[in-house]
Amino acid sequence: MSRPFRVLHIASECAPFAKSGGLGDVVGALPLAQRAQGIDARVLIPLYRGIDWNAQQRLPYTLIVPMGGFTAYAGVRRGHLAHSDTPIYFLEHHHYYDRGGIYGDEHGEFGDNLERFAFLCRSAFALCRAEGFVPDVLHAHDWQAALVPIYVNTVEWGSEYHGCATVLTVHNLAYQGLFSPSALSVTGLGNEHLNERELEHFGALNLLKGGLMHADRISTVSPTYAREMQRPEHGAGLDGVVRARSDRLVGILNGVDTVVWNPATDPRIAARYDANDLRGKTYCKEALQRELGLPVRRDVPLYGVISRLTGQKGLDVLLSILPRFLERDLQLVVLGTGEPELERGFEVAARMQSDKVRAVLRFDDGMAHRIEAGADFFLMPSRYEPCGMNQMYSMRYGTLPIVHATGGLADTVWNYDEGTGDGTGFVLYDLTPRALLDTVLWSYWTYVHRYHHIDRMRRRAMEQSFGWDRSAAAYLRLYHDAYRARRGHPYFG
């Protein structure tokens, strides 16, 4: 009998253990879907403060990890992803990871992040040796794991791991792992790798560039973002590198957890509902209005925002149109934290128009679910969005997204057709105050004058399929392609 295909994911985050954004969601969900499809998928992340250490099994060995000019040591604990048999290994090194943040704290980024994540990458090979596990694919995520494909082609040249195919997933090209070239020695790589074909980029040591140049195959989190990465306006200085490697690049749309985000079973919302019976959504809207202290009115549209409050998310543009937007008979709730000036702007709007606006400036997962269920529209005018998940959560809950056509937003939201009533949301193609205001007022007009179209769109949105099984199948095809490129023959099992 053939053995299962073997994959090790190396990442700095994995939900629910450690998460600062979409990377953690992907690493927490994709291996589960792969395991369900018969792949022997496993995960390696650091053991951070805040993870329940004692709930994880301590393994009976110590990893010996060669670094640049010294040897470091690590313990390993093993747990499992969310009610499954999918192994997750936690790299235990208190000096590197027992800190008050993943990448930094209130004082800024940790000064030894290069050393911390080089240690993670080198440890991946030590872990595989200790476990007797030789992956068919080493799947590295973002700059924190980008040294893995470089190590396969360099320090592991004469080992069994030189035959491992490598896949590097870019979750956001803006984060590249930039360091001083003088720090390269800590990685254990020689200065001969500090060149324009590998790790050097405009005078800096750039880990993501090195990974892009060495990986057998590259993926990113939506087809549109795979194209956008190759253009200067979205390439963050690496567009030329991505274009040069475009023959090995694919965009695979992220999925969402359809168990956690399911209005038919969600315990966090006031009433359950589905596409065949939307009465529960009306109850959820009224419950949310009461919770927020807004007037309980079915006849006014309720707009929701759940986001980091940053310019990248286009919320400065939203704030600029708020006076005109709020001239209409509608309501708005904003949930999130971020840039102080944006927080202040939404706070002021909530004070000035307390009958229309609420600003909830915190992270609150339960409130996020209640907004998705209770809102009529979801505002997501991101300047760029590699994939985005909230637009998919919104559609699951029959809440129509209003999005800028970029990245995964362009790939997932079908623009409203006034003639037929088809569509799953409202799309703007230029992120300007005028375009955003026009699109928001278009959604308002449709709600007031063509509510039957809103009802039709809600049901259509809830019928969309965003599960991880489709993404997992696409990654398996990519893995086989990477394996063939690495080994010179197909995978036979």
Image (cartoon, grey):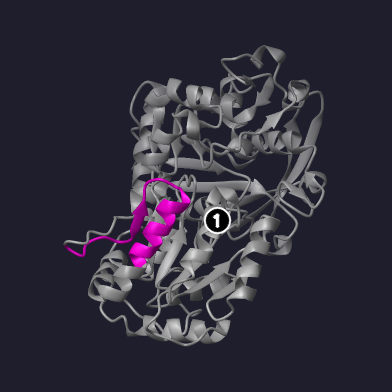
State which quadrant residue 51 falls in. bottom right
Residue appearing at x 22%, y 59% in the figure: 417
Residue appearing at x 27%, y 74% in the figure: 449
Name the quarter where the C terminus is drawn: top left
Residue appearing at x 59%, y 44% in the figure: 11
Q: Position of residue 96 (x, y in %)?
A: 78, 44
Name the quarter where the N terminus is drawn: top left
Q: Is residue 26 magenta?
A: no
**Is 107 on the left or on the right of 138, as rendered?**
right
**Is 245 on the left or on the right of 50, as rendered?**
left
Q: Which residues are magenta?
A: 420-443
| Number of marks in the rendered image | 1
**Is 275 on the left or on the right of 167, as rendered?**
left
Q: Position of residue 361 (x, y in %)?
A: 65, 68
State which quadrant residue 161 falls in. top right
Q: Is residue 440 magenta?
A: yes
Above or below residue 249? Residue 348 is: below
The residue pinned by badge 1 equals 315
Which residue is at the front of the view, 385 or 111? 385
Above or below residue 438? Residue 376 is: below
Q: Is residue 34 visible?
A: yes
